[in-house]
């Protein structure tokens, strides 16, 4: 087992648990759709966090350059992986029983969720630097700065219009970043 494989095993578990939590929460909402209160903003954030987890894992593949990892880099990578997992838990309560009310859940956890999301955007920068892609593309740093600021504002602003904008923006941003910008990376084959 290479050092890269060793380092990424626990990251894979955390990413997989985050995706599982999102899919389980969404599945429960679909099963209870007659009684559940679905909300498109919450669904946008579900898609965004799912895409982020997938992109985080996919980009980690390209860090497989044979170099060794320090313990500090490893712990930081675990921390960065844990943030979107925690965001997933804030979207779907683990102890929820019965039909979920997505809007109530989101509004109750909005400050926490968007605070964690802002930290996730900030944490992406050192991880990208560890992978050697800090200036690839050249607009990566300004983009992450904008994403951090928008998330931080959302954590403090209960304005429903801003929350709707933010959810739609990040879903489009995540898809665009993953497919258009990072999709230009070579395939994993």
Image (cartoon, rainbow, N blue to C red):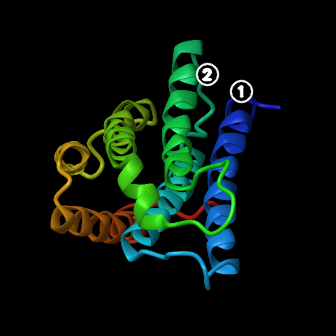
Residue closer to the observer: 136 or 97? 97
**Horizontal relation, residue 177 to residue 141: left or right:** right
Q: Where's residue 22, x and y in %?
A: 60, 60
**Horizontal relation, residue 40 to residue 15: left or right:** left
**Label 1 CA crowd tier, 10 Å (few <14, some 14–19, many 20+):** few
Q: Where's residue 81, x and y in %?
A: 54, 38
**Which residue is pictured at 41% across the width and 70% down the height?**
44
Vertical placement of 144 versus 122: above or below? Answer: below
> Spatial distance from mark 1 to mark 2, Cα to Cα?
6 Å
Residue closer to the observer: 144 or 139? 144
Vertical placement of 90 versus 105: above or below? Answer: above
Vertical placement of 158 versus 69: above or below? Answer: below
Q: Quadrant of the N terminus?
A: top right
Task: Determine which residue is flagged by label 1.
Answer: 3
Q: Which of marks 1 and 2 is nearer the N terminus?
A: 1
**Label 2 CA crowd tier, 10 Å (few <14, some 14–19, many 20+):** few
**Which residue is pictured at 75% across the width and 30% down the height?**
6
Q: Where's residue 101, x and y in %?
A: 50, 67
**Which residue is pictured at 17% across the width and 44% down the height?**
149
Task: Determine which residue is flagged by label 2.
Answer: 68
Secondary structure under the numbered disc 1 in the rendered image: helix
Secondary structure under the numbered disc 2 in the rendered image: loop
- Furthest toward the top, the residue is 71
The reply to whether residue 189 is in sight is no
Q: Where's residue 3, x and y in %?
A: 71, 27
Vertical placement of 176 versus 12: above or below? Answer: below
């Amino acid at each position: 087992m290479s050092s890269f494989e060793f380092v990424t095993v626990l990251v894979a578990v955390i990413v997989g648990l985050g995706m599982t939590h999102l899919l389980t929460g969404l599945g429960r909402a679909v099963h209870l759709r007659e009684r559940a209160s679905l909300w498109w903003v919450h669904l946008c954030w579900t898609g965004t966090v799912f895409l982020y987890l997938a992109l985080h894992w996919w980009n980690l593949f390209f860090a497989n350059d044979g170099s060794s990892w320090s313990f500090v880099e490893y712990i930081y990578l675990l921390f960065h992986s844990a943030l979107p997992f925690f965001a997933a838990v804030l979207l779907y309560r683990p102890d929820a029983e019965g039909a979920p009310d997505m809007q109530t859940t989101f509004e109750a956890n909005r400050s926490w969720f968007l605070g964690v999301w802002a930290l996730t955007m900030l944490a992406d920068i050192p991880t990208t630097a560890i992978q050697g892609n800090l200036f690839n593309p050249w607009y990566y740093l300004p983009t992450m700065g904008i994403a951090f600021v928008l998330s931080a504002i959302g954590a403090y602003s209960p304005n429903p219009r801003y929350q709707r904008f933010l959810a739609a923006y990040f879903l489009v941003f995540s898809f665009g970043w993953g497919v258009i910008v990072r999709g230009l990376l070579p395939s994993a084959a």
